[in-house]
Amino acid sequence: MAGALQLPIIDLSSPDRMSTSNSIRQACTEVGLFYLINHGVEEELRVRVFDESRKFFSLPLQLKLNLSRKEHRGYTPLYAEKLDPSSNSTGDSKESFYIGPLEDSTTQCKLNQWPSEELLPSWKPTMETYYRKVLSAGKRLISLIALALNLDEDFFEKVGALTVPSAFLRLLHYPVWNSGELESSNEEIYGASAHSDYGMITLLATDGVRGLQVCREKQNQPRIWEDVQNIDGAFIVNIGDMMERWTNCLFRSTLHRVMPAGQERYSVAFFLDPSPDCLVECLRSCCSESCPGRFPPIRSKDYLEERFSLTYA
Ligand SMILES: O=C(O)CCC(=O)C(=O)O
Ligand SMILES: [Fe+2]
C-alpha cells in the first residue's frame, strides 16, 4: 500500500514573491512536486474542459482515429504509449489527445487537429481558452522558479526558453479496470507506467479519482510509491527532466506513475517545455568543483525528439 504524501502548497498570487520562491526552492529540491493555488484558471473553465474531454473520448473509436497523432498533435489510442520502456506491460492503459502551440507565426499552429465543429461545437474554443490561461500561469510560475534559483526573474525568457515554448496540453482518459481483469491479466497493467516528464514543468489537473503516485528516491530499489492526493482547484506541478538538467539535479524531476483505480479516470496535463532552439545547459550557480556539471548542453528540440522516440518505439 502506498502512503499519502504531504506536499507544499504554493500560492501564485501571493505578493510576497521572495517567500513564495523560497517555498518553491524547498519543494523542488526535496520532492520536485507541489500544489499550485490561486493560479488564475477559473474552476468553471476547468469543469468545461473535463466535460469536453469526456465528450471526445466517448466518440466512436473510428472518429477518434481519424484524428490520430501526427507531429505530436492529436489522438493516441489505448496501449499506444509506453512511458516506461523497461516495464513488462504491453503499453499504458490510457488514451489521450495532444494540443500543441496555438499562436505561432511558423507553421506550428496549423499542425493541431480538432474534432469537427458539427460533432463538438464548443470543443476548440474551450481548449484554446484553457491552453492560454494555463500557459500564462505557467510563465508566471517559471519566473518564480528563476527567483528560487537565485536568478533574475526573466532568466528563462532571456535564454530563449519562452520565445516559442513547446507547450502541450494533453487530455487523458484511463478506462476502468475491474479487479477480475487485473487478476487474470498476465501482464503488469499501468494507467501510465513509471516516468518523469521531459520538459521544464507540468501543471496537472485531475478529476479527483486516485491513481497518481510518486517515488521520491528514484535511484533506490525497491521503489517506494506514495499516493498524491488531489486538492480541488489546485494544479499538481512537477519538475521535468530538462529543468533537472539545467539545475544539475538540484531540482528533482519526479518519477511518477498512474495505477488502475477500479474507476474511470480523467486528467489534463499541461507540459511547459523550452522553445525548440533553446540550449539547456547546467547553470553555473548549480555547478562547483565538488559538483561538476553532469549533463552536456543539449537543444530542447533534440532532447524531446530523443525521449519521444523511446516512448513511442
Ligand atoms: O494522469 C495523470 O495523473 C498523470 C499523467 C502523466 O503523468 C503524464 O501524462 O505525463
Ligand atoms: Fe507524467
Image: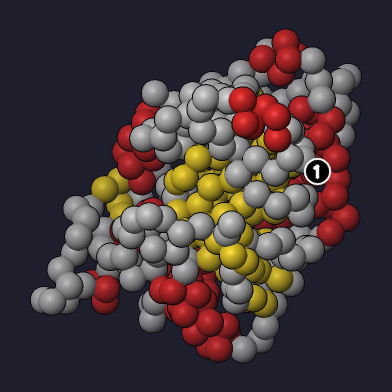
Report the side of 232 relative to 166 (left or right).
Answer: right
Q: Secondary structure at mark 1?
A: helix
Mark 1 surroundings: few (<14), some (14-19) or many (≥20) residues within 10 A: many
Work out whether residue 173 can be spotted.
no
Name the quarter where the N terminus is drawn: bottom right
Q: Nearer the viewer, residue 261 or 121?
A: 261
Look at mark 1 in the image and give the residue it sits on: 50
Q: Is residue 301 above or below residue 249?
A: above
Residue 24 vs 274, above or below: the answer is: below
- Which kind of residue does numbered mark 1 sit on? Phe
Residue at the image position 63 percent from the left and 32 percent from the top: 182
234, above or below 22, in the image: above
Going 31% across and 65% down the picture, which residue do you hit? 249
Give coordinates of residue 101: x percent, y percent: 58, 40
Q: Which quadrant is home to the C terminus?
A: top left
Specify how the rendered protein is coloured. secondary structure
Residue 109 horizontal/vertical position (percent): 59, 33
| Residue plotted at (19% across, 53% down) | 296
Q: Is 58 on the left or on the right of 150, as rendered? A: right
Q: Is residue 1 above or below residue 21?
A: above
